[in-house]
Image (cartoon, rainbow, N blue to C red):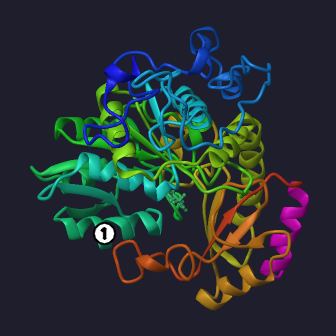
Amino acid sequence: MANEAGAGPEDPRGPRGPGRGATARPSPAGRHTLGGMSDSYTHFETLAIHAGNTADPLTGAVVPPIYQVSTYKQDGVGGLRGGYEYSRSANPTRTALEENLAALEGGSRGLAFASGLAAEDCLLRTLLSPGDHVVIPNDAYGGTFRLFAKVVSRWGVDWSVADTSDPAAVRAAITPKTKVVWVETPSNPLLGITDIPAVAQIAREAGAKLVVDNTFATPYLQQPLALGADVVVHSLTKYMGGHSDVVGGALIVGDQGLGEELAYHQNAMGAVAGPFDSWLVLRGTKTLAVRMDRHSENATRIADMLTRHPRVSRVLYPGLPEHPGHEVAAKQMKAFGGMVSFQVEGGEEAAVAVCDRARVFTLGESLGGVESLIEHPGRMTHASAAGSALEVPADLVRLSVGIENVDDLLEDLQQALGK
Ligand code: PLP
C-alpha cells in the first residue's frame, strides 16, 4: 500500500509511508488510526483524548509510545511493516499527533512540524511561486511578518497589508495575482477579529486560499475549516502544547489533494516534529478543553478589572462588549480565549515598568501555557515589525493569562500597575 503510494525518502518523487497513501492512512497493525473514533465520538473533549490515541496493541499502553527511531526494519525490499520506513517521512508518534490534530480541527489531514514558522514556511512554499501575491494582516505575529517581508519576498512573492477585520479592505487588497489571504483571529498582539466566513468568500471569489492562524483561539474555541478556511496554521508551542515545554507547528486542511501536496513538501523540506515533541503536544491536547475554559474565564475577569483601572487607557479583549470585533467573535468563537492586551497611561516607559513589576505574571515571550506571562510586544515579540505597517503601540502590554487562581493574578496586576 505504502509502496504504491509513492517513493521513499531518497526518491525525489516523494515520501511513502502512513498518511501518504491515496486512500486511507495505514498505521502499524491498526494503531493510531481513528478506529472509527471520529465517527462514534463527535464531542471535542472525547476526540481530544481518543483521536490518534488508540491503545498500543503490543502492551495495551493507553498512551502512544515515543517511537524514538529513525528507520524501520523492512520485510524484504519494498515490504514495509505498517508503512513506516524513515522518520522524516513518517513516525508513529507523529502520526498519532497528526491524526489527533486533524480530528480536532475537523480536517482530513494534519501535519506536524518542528515549529509554527516551519509549518508556515512549508505552506507558503507549497502554495506560492514567484510572481504570486499574498494579502497579510496589519496585525500578526512578528515572526510571520518577518517570514513574508524578509524571506518569502526574496523569492519573488509580492505581499500587501490589509486590515483583515474589515472585509472590504481585504477585497481591495486582492490583485489578479493573489493566491493566499492570510488571517490571524484573534490577532497577535492587538486581539483583532476577522470574520472568517466573510473573508473566505472573498478569497474563494478571487481564486485564492484562505489561511487562518488559529493559534490564539485553538480548535476548542474556533474551527476555521468549518467556517470556510482552506488551511489552519498552529504554533503548537502555545495552547495546544499548553505547558511551555515544547516548540512545534501544524497545518490542517480539509481538501485531501492539498493534504497530499503538503505532505509531499513536508517530507521534501524536512522540518518535521520529532517523536518526543509530538508526544508532548499529544499529551497537551488531551486537556485543551478544560484549560481553554479556565484561560477564558480568568482573562474575562482580568479584562474587566483593567477596563476600570485608572492607569489603563485601553483594553483589547474580544470578550468585552465594546471591542469592535465582539459580535463577530461571539458568532465564530465558543469563548474569547486567554490573551488580553492593554495600553498604559504614561507611554512606553510606564508599560515597560508594569512588565518589570509583575511577580506572578512571568516576564517572557510566548503564550498559551498554564502559567501567566506578561510582555512588552514593541520591544519583545514584535520588535521585528518596527517601522512597518505592523508596528505595535509603544504603550502596549500583552498578557497570556494562565490557569492560576484568578485572585492572585488580579492582585499581581494591581500591584504592577500601582493599584
Ligand atoms: N503564529 C502565532 C500567532 C504566534 O504567536 C507564533 C509564535 O509566537 C507563531 C505563529 C510562530 O510559532 P513558533 O514560535 O512555534 O514558530
Residue 388's place in the image compared with 43, above or below, is below
- Secondary structure of the residue carrying numbered label 1: helix
In this view of the protein, which residue sits in the foreground, 182 or 55? 55
Comparing 399 with 247, the one in front is: 247
Q: For the C terminus, which image quadrant?
A: bottom right
The reply, left or right, for residue 315 in relation to residue 152 is right
Asked whether 86 or 306 is in front, the reply is: 86
**Circle 1: is it few (<14), some (14-19), or many (20+) Cα within 10 Å?**
few
State yes or no: residue 410 in magenta: yes
Q: Is residue 146 left or right of residue 42?
A: left
> Is 381 rendered above or below residue 239?
below
Asked if 20 appears above or below 416 in the picture, the reply is above
Residue at 72 percent of width and 16 percent of height: 57
Give the residues in magenta. 406-419
**Amino acid type shown at disc 1:** Val
Report x, y in % for residue 326: 53, 47
x, y percent for residue 91: 55, 36
Which sits in the foreground, 98 or 227? 98
Q: Is residue 203 left or right of residue 131?
A: right
Report which residue position mark 1 lands on. Answer: 151
Q: From the image, which quarter does the N terminus lie in?
A: top left
Q: Is residue 214 magenta?
A: no
Q: Residue furthest front?
A: 76
Q: Which corner quadrant of the image does residue 361 belong to? A: bottom right
